[in-house]
Amino acid sequence: MTAPRGTTPAGTASEEQAARYVRGMFGRVAGKYDLLNHLLSFQVDRYWRNTTVRRVEHILRRPGMRVMDLCCGTGDLLLAIEQRTSQQSLVLGSDFCHPMLVAALDKATRRHACAPLFEGDGLQLPLADNSLDLVTVAFGFRNFANYRKGLRELRRVLKPGGMLAILEFSTPPNALIRSVYGLYSRRILPAIGGLVSGSKDAYTYLPESVRKFPGAEVLAAEMEGAGYTRVKFERMTFGVVALHTGLSG
């Protein structure tokens, strides 16, 4: 299977249009995003994020680490990461959707967290080369307008030997699970998501973006092609989600 170039929302014909659609779509659902994440995943999204933190904890515990949670959304993974880093480390949160960052800031303030937040596009980050030890991306990478460009950009900002961790929806390898999950994502998820969020198009786009996204093996190959080493992936919840990790060469 050949990996698609990037996300392709209906009605878009360029990377710029795709990025504009995704930014607007997430802005419309930001207020209900946490509620729907927990509701539509039956709270399993908490397990996925906690597992991701455990897999990168060996980096977080080192003093002086510089970490960025990209596509941080409302900040769930970002805040979990910050709780596990040493006091000498710096944890940054970034998203290109302003309403999501507003929600993340509100959540961080309520929890007395201090991770700096900035608005940035994962295809062109305002960061120096070789500046980070770890980049995490949870459920945001499939929304990139250009996957290969995104992988190269993240490798640019990582120090040699730095780690990229991508937590993303995937295609279950089991045919029965794939069929059941496909039915749920096409019929039930858009209906509930649209009703609760008031934006049916957003929760029609989201399962469609998962369907079009590369499978776990293809994404691993894309990471290797972008220069990452020691690439591996771990499927979770029957393969509905996969966590990919790789080191910057």
Image (cartoon, grey):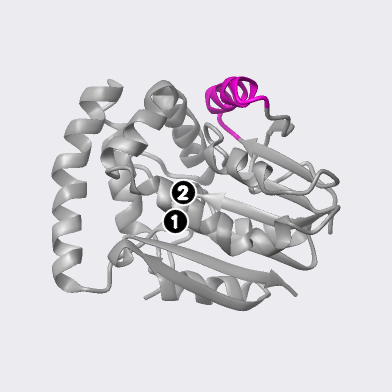
Does 94 appear above or below 139?
above
In this rendering, would 150 be left or right of 161? left
Residue type, label 1 = Glu
Magenta part of the chain: 96-112
In this rendering, would 100 be left or right of 69? left
Q: Which residue is mark 1?
A: 168
Q: Which type of secondary structure does the marked residue at label 2 adopt?
A: loop
Horizontal and vertical percent position of residue 38:
34, 37
Which residue appears at 32% of the width and 32% of the height?
Answer: 36
Please say whether residue 3 is one of the residues in the magenta stretch: no
Give the quadrant of residue 227: bottom right
Confirm or deny contact between disc 1 and disc 2 (CB under 8 A): yes
Horizontal and vertical percent position of residue 114:
73, 30
Q: Which residue is mark 2?
A: 139
Along the line of sight, the residue nearer the viewer: 3 or 42: 42
Could you tell me how many numbered marks the image carries?
Answer: 2
Which residue appears at 61% of the width and 56% of the height?
Answer: 150
Name the outermost residue toward the bottom.
230
Horizontal and vertical percent position of residue 226:
64, 71
Residue type, label 2 = Phe
Quarter holding the N terminus?
A: bottom left
Q: Which type of secondary structure does the marked residue at label 1 adopt?
A: strand
Quarter holding the C terminus?
A: bottom right
Q: Residues within 10 Å of mark 1 (few under 14, many from 20)?
A: many
Q: Residues within 10 Å of mark 2 (few under 14, many from 20)?
A: some
